[in-house]
Amino acid sequence: MNNQFHKFIKKNNLFSKNDKVLIAVSGGIDSIVMLDLFAKTKLEIAIVHCNFQLRSDESMEDEKFVRSLSKKYKLQFFVKKFDTKKYASSQKISIQMAARELRYNWFEKIRKEICFDYISIAHNKDDIVETFFLNLIRGTGIRGLTGINAKNDKIVRPLLFADRKMIDSYRLENQLPFREDSSNKSIKYKRNKIRHQILPLFNELNPAFSDTILENIEKLAATEKIYATAIEDVKNKVISHSENQIKISLNELQKHKPYKTFLYELIYKFGFTQENVADICKSIGYVSGRQFFTKSHRIIIDREFLIITEKKTISYEEFQINSETKEISEPISLKLGLNPSISSDKIKKNTEIAYLDFDTLKFPLKIRKWEKGDRFFPLGMKKSKKLSDFFIDQKFSILEKENQWILTSEDKIVWIIGKRIDNRFKISEKTKKVLIIKS
C-alpha cells in the first residue's frame, strides 16, 4: 500500500517533496492509516483535529487519543473545540453540514497561520461511492455524480486509490490503534444508511458493484467536461458585467434550450437552488421587479435582464454640505461653485448639473438615499409628485432606485441628483447668487 500511496500522489501531482502538509486526523481507521503513511515520508507534517463536541465523553477521548499520536510521531498538534449544534442552529443547516463548514474553515485558517502548503483529508474509494448516492438523493445534477477530486486547491486526498478493506489490512499489518466513532453505526445519518443498508443490497446483485459504480463515475466525469464546455459557451453569450452587477439577457437565455438548466448552471454558485430557478422562470415576462434571495446574493427580474448583485444593507447615513464646500467625494463625487446670477437661457440643459438659487437654500445641505413617501416639485411643475411615481415615469429599475441619492435643504428635496431639480429652488429673475453643482 505504501508504494500505491506514493504512486497516487505522483500521478495526481498532489504536492512536492518540499511541501508542508497538515494531516486531518479524527482518530478513525482511515485517518490513522493516512497519518502513518505520511510519517514514513520525509515530508514536514503536522496534525489537526476537530472536537465537534457531539458525543460528550467520546469526543474528549478522541481528542486525547489524537494528542497522544502527535507525541508518538513527534509532530505539532492543533485542536479546536466547536459548538457544532449552536452553529448548525444559527446557520439553519444540518449538523453534518455545520461540521463540514467548521472543519474546512478552521483547517484553512491554521494552514495560513503556520505557513503550510496543503491539508490532507482521509477520503477513500468507498467514500466516492457513498457520496455518489448521497448526491443522487439530493438531486445535485451531473456535477455531483462525478466523484471526489484528489486535489481541490489546498485540499488533497491521497487515499482515494484505496478501499476500506485495503486500509484495514494495512492497519492490521502495522498494528495501528484507532478510535471507533459510535455514530458511524447509526443509520439515522443518510451516509450510514447507504453504507450499511443500501450498498450491501447492490453488492448482492453484483459483487463488483463498487468497481462498476467507479467506472460509471469516470464516464460521468468525462461527460461533465463536455457539459461544462456547453455551459461556458452559453455563459459568454448571455452574461454581461456592469459595475457590481451581473446581468443575464433574458432574450439570449431563452434562445438556449432547455434554458432552465442553463439558468441553474449560471446562478447555482450564488446559492440559488433548482426551486429558485423554477420560480424565477415562472415570473419571467409576468412579474418585473420580483426579487429572489440567498444568504449572499439576490436576483432581480428586470424587463430585459436578470440582475445579480451581492446583498447589501441600504445606507441610511446622511452626508452634509456646508456653504463653503467646493467639492465632495463621498458618498458621490460633486463639484460646487458660486456664481453671480445667470439668465435661464444660458443654463446648459444637462441633468447632471444643478443650477440653484443660493438664497433659497438652508445650510448645511444633506445628501441621503430616497425614502418611501418622499415628494418634490419637479422643475416646471406647481404640484408635488411622489418620488416613487417619478421613478416609475423614468422607468427606474429597482437597483437604480436603491442607488439614487437625494440632495435636501432642511426637509425639502432640492435635487434628485443627476436627474431633476425641485422647482422651488430654480433660479429666477430675482436670483442674486447661483449655486452650481456638477455630478
Image (tube, rainbow, N blue to C red):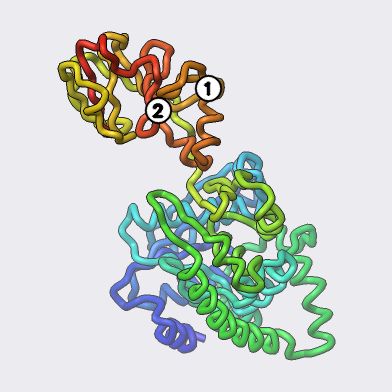
Q: Secondary structure at mark 1?
A: strand
In x, y percent, where is residue 370? 47, 26
Q: CA distance from mark 1 to mark 2?
A: 12 Å
Quadrant in which the C terminus appears: top left
Residue 177 quadrant:
bottom right
Give me the residue at 74% from left, 71% from top: 195
> In the picture provided, is 139 more to the left or to the right than 389?
right
Give me the residue at 24% from left, 12% from top: 431
Disc 1 target residue:
385
Label located before the other in sequence (1 or 2)? 1
Image height of 112 relative to 376, above or below: below
Residue 392 quadrant:
top right
Image height of 100 relative to 32, above or below: above
Along the line of sight, the residue nearer the viewer: 287 or 269:
287
In x, y percent, where is residue 246? 46, 55
Disc 2 target residue:
416
* Residue 67 in view: no
> In the picture provided, is 285 more to the left or to the right than 242?
right
> In the picture provided, is 286 more to the left or to the right than 143?
right
Image height of 218 relative to 431, above or below: below
Image height of 293 relative to 217, above or below: above
Along the line of sight, the residue nearer the viewer: 212 or 35:
212
Query: How many residues crowd mark 2 within 10 Å: few (<14), some (14–19), many (20+)?
Result: many
CB-based contact (under 8 Å), mark 1 and mark 2:
no
* Residue 118 in view: yes
Q: Which is closer to the viewer, label 1 or label 2?
A: 1
In the image, what residue type sits under mark 1?
Lys
Query: How many residues crowd mark 1 within 10 Å: few (<14), some (14–19), many (20+)?
Result: some
Give me the residue at 32% from left, 16% from top: 365
Judged from this view, the residue extending furthest toward the front is 345
Q: Secondary structure at mark 2?
A: strand
Give me the residue at 56% from left, 85% from top: 222
